[in-house]
Amino acid sequence: MISKTKILYNKYLLYTIYLPSNKLKVYIRSILVAHNFKMIFENHIYACGIEVRRLYRILKFKNFENE
């Protein structure tokens, strides 16, 4: 038969291990979501920068033709 102290110790372990792991999961998920949003935003900014450079080259080339 299992002693009461063993049962209490097991309940204590379940409480102390399970509770922080749930909180950690929430924090990790929110960090991952924020990181993914940051990556999407950075990719969008990079794509906009490429588009601006492309338009600048086109306009610069057009100005040389007009002169």
Image: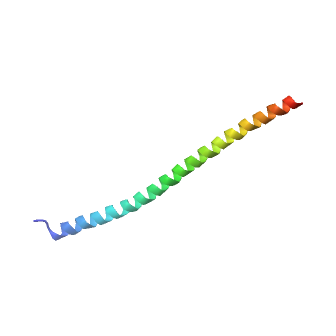
In the rendered image, the residue lying farthest to the left is 1
Left or right relative to 30: residue 21: left
Q: Residue 53: percent from the left, percent from the top?
A: 72, 38
Q: Is residue 67 above or below residue 40?
A: above
Q: Is residue 39 above or below residue 50?
A: below
Left or right relative to 65: residue 5: left
Name the residue nearer the viewer: 39 or 20: 39
Left or right relative to 43: residue 14: left
Q: Residue 3: percent from the left, percent from the top?
A: 14, 68
Quadrant of the image containing the N terminus = bottom left
Residue at image position (64%, 41%) is 47
Q: Residue 18: percent from the left, percent from the top?
A: 32, 62
Q: Is residue 67 above or below residue 19?
A: above
Q: Is residue 44 above or below residue 15?
A: above
Q: Residue 37: percent from the left, percent from the top?
A: 54, 51
Residue at image position (25%, 67%) is 11
